[in-house]
Image (cartoon, rainbow, N blue to C red):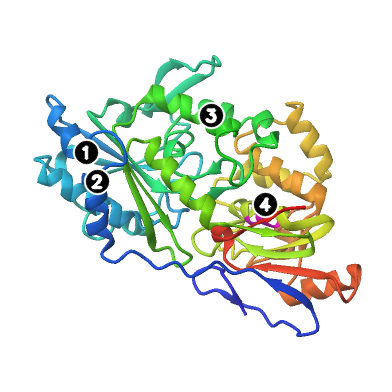
Amino acid sequence: MKIDYGKEGLDINLDPKWNITILCASEQKSIESPKVKIKESINNPIEGPSLKEIIDKKVNLNSVCIVSSDATRPVPSNLILEAIVEELNLNGIDDNKISVLIATGLHRTSRDDELERILGKTLINRITIIDHKATDMDSLVYIGKSADNDPIFVNRYYYSADLKILTGYVEPHFFFGFSGGRKSLVPGIVGIDTIQVNHSAEKIASPYARFGIYKENPLHKHSLAISKKIGVDFIINVCINKKHEIIEIASGDFIKAHEKLVDYQLKQTFTGIKERYDVVICGNGGYPLDLNLYQAVKSMAIGELAVKDGGTIIAVNECVEGIGIGQDKFKELIFSGMVPKEIYKKILNKEIVVPDQWEIQILARILMKADVFIISELNENEIGNIGLKYAKNVEDAIRTCLKKYGSDASILILPNGPQLLPLYKK
């Protein structure tokens, strides 16, 4: 069988004697003529005025900022952006008034080839492109404090724009509940101080900071409150299938349109399981979601949903970028020699306060529950010394597990990353 891995997938040779369950994402037919459908959605919003009506009410509209997902996201942003720009042009807004802001959060900036993939060849040389830099204070503006007295720094290009548009895609997220909507702003285009408050150790530790949990999720609630203060004029979000094709679209009010797609995903993505498994084999959904070990933690969180206490997760991620470009603190901590429980405790006690601490916090939490094998392009000396295990391939990792749990050990394979998530029900 094949599991999503990089651009080509990874073939696994399964022994018929092994006790294996495979849960694949169902085939979800892509929307025909997606750009046409996106335009239809823009002109028929979920709630509130259409884009045209918003433009008509603006006085002296000289700048439009469209927020787009960064290169680590598999959404076909080029189709969304092309549709929006065509609609803007149709309503009298020239290209020289339009900019696309890449919502990098704390990720690295975009390479030229990635920008072409995000914008497409039609737009790449037509409109201004800006990579958000959360640590560049000159590119940020302070707009006050949240209700919790947290500082709000936001990208000044977005905040000063006369027309503010968000794009993105909605799928279950391993600590934010769901991607899309408010997440394009917080953490997408805010400053590091605002991100770290939103992604605090206390919020990440909440039992509600998990896949598919929405209104009770503390990160969601914090992000939504700040997003309202920052302001959004219009949103276009989509859902995608395992081939990264658009299957659902919602436009309009940035809360209501997002909620519609959250409801869609709640019905489509989760499948019940009656037992947890000794071994769970899972990935992140292939390229670009499995570019590095930092991103691979998401796949381990998928395994966490279905693995027994003391079981094993076999995380299958290509990791062609290694640990992760710019993830120096993450690398430092996975080579710290500390046991996961010690790392987790120090993060909660604020003895460790670093950028991206949430990723190592979640990794430590998972390693406290289960063993984790890494199947990737990484060498054994590149995966750190806090407990991650190395295997050359999935088959070798399975054989090691069978020695530990017995020849009849229960094995679950989830080949499509977050496209299908197991939900344990007693």
Q: Earlier in the sequence, mark 3 or mark 4?
A: 3
Callout 2 amino acid: Ile
- Give the label on residue 301, or none: 4
Q: Looking at the picture, how far across and down is residue 54, in whole percent?
A: 19, 32
Labelled pair 2, 1 in contact (Cβ < 8 Å): yes
Question: Residue sitting at 60 percent across and 33 percent down?
Answer: 216
Task: Identify whether 302 is placed above or below 413.
Answer: above
> For the view shown, which residue lies furthest in the front direction?
426
Mark 3 or 4: in front is 3
Q: Residues within 10 Å of mark 4 (few under 14, many from 20)?
A: many
- Give the label on residue 42, or none: 2
Q: Earlier in the sequence, mark 4 or mark 2?
A: 2
Which residue is the site of mark 3?
A: 221
> For the view shown, which residue lies furthest in the left direction?
92
Q: Looking at the picture, how far across and down is residue 79, in whole percent?
A: 29, 57
Callout 4 amino acid: Ala
Secondary element at tag 2: helix
Start-end of magenta stretch: 299-303
Q: Earlier in the sequence, mark 2 or mark 3?
A: 2
Mark 3 or 1: in front is 1
- Give the label on residue 312, or none: none
Q: Earlier in the sequence, mark 2 or mark 1?
A: 2
